[in-house]
Amino acid sequence: MTTFTLKNALMATMLIAGAALMTGCGSSGAQSSSDFASRGVISSVSESDKKALAVCNQTTGSDLAARQMAYTEGSSYRMDLVWVKLTTLPSDFASGTSYISMWKWLANSNGSTYLDSTAVPVALYDTQTKKFITNWGTSIKWTEISSMALAMGYSSPTSFFGRVTILANLKDTNGEYDALKISVYSTSTNKAINEINGLLPLFSANPNAYAVESSGAARATVLQKLHPFYTYKSAGYTTAQFQSMAQNYCF
C-alpha cells in the first residue's frame, strides 16, 4: 500500500466507505453556542498551559482502551484533527471477526446529545518512519492491515499499534464536538458489540472547572462524567496537578 506524507494525507480526498454505521447516543439535539465551551479553542500551544487545558486523554473500557492527543501544527493546535492510540484491543480483533470505527458527538447544557451519522475518517501513521501507511478510511480491520504489520515485523495487533498511531479527521475546525466514540463491530452482523467514549482534547484539566460552561451554566452531566478525573473532583488536587496528570496520557 502506498505511503504518503502528512501534507498529502490532509489534502487527500476522504474515502467514505458505504453507509455509516450508527449506534445510539441518547436523544439528538441541535447544537447551541454553549457547546463551544467544552473544547478550548486556542491560538497557540503556549495557551494550553495558561488556560490549564488537558492536551491528552485516556479512556478505558472492557477489552478496549485508547488515548487521545491534541494535534499540533507549528505552534498551534488544530481542532479538526486528533491523534488516537489504541492501547487495548478486543480479544477477537486479531481473528478478523470484529473491526473498529470512530464517531464524534456533542451534548448541550440541557443534556441532549447528537451523534454525527458519518464515521470519522482515520489514517494509520508509522511513528518510526514518520509516514502514513494507509489512506483515509472509516474502519480499521486487522484482515486489511495484518500483512502490512507482518512486513513491519509484528504478528499481533497490540504490538503493531504500539508503534502505529491513528490520525482522526474530525472535520471540526471550531471544536464544536465534545467527544469521540470508539466502537467495535461484529464483522458478520455489522452491529456494535463494544464501545468507549472519551472527551476530545482540548478541555479543562480540572474537572471542577470543566463542570461549568463559559456561560455559567452547568455542563451536561454525560460530559462531566467522561472527564478522566471526574472521580477526583473532591480529592483536593490543584489545577496544576490535574494538568500534569493529563500530560501523562500523552504519547
Image (spheres, rainbow, N blue to C red):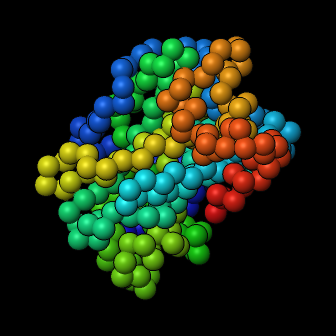
Residue lying furthest front = 235
* Between 84 and 197, the one nearer to me in the picture: 197
Residue lying furthest left = 188
Where residue 182 sits: x, y (%)? 40, 48
Can residue 170 be seen here? The reply is: no
Where residue 227 sits: x, y (%)? 59, 40
Say left or right for 195 vs 30.
left
Position of the N terminus by quadrant: bottom left
Position of the C terminus by quadrant: bottom right
Give me the residue at 81% from left, 36% from top.
51
The answer to which image quadrant residue 21 occupies is top left
Give me the residue at 45% from left, 77% from top.
159
Where residue 107 sits: x, y (%)? 50, 24
Image vertical order of residue 1 relative to residue 176, above or below: below
Give me the residue at 29% from left, 36% from top.
23
Where residue 118 sits: x, y (%)? 35, 35
Image vertical order of residue 124 relative to residue 172, above or below: below
Residue lying furthest bottom = 153
Count of numbered marks = 0
Image vertical order of residue 2 relative to residue 229, above or below: below
Image vertical order of residue 154 relative to residue 93, above or below: below
Say left or right for 34 vs 139.
right
Can residue 231 be seen here? The reply is: yes
Give me the residue at 36% from left, 25% from top.
26
* Between 13 and 59, the one nearer to me in the picture: 59
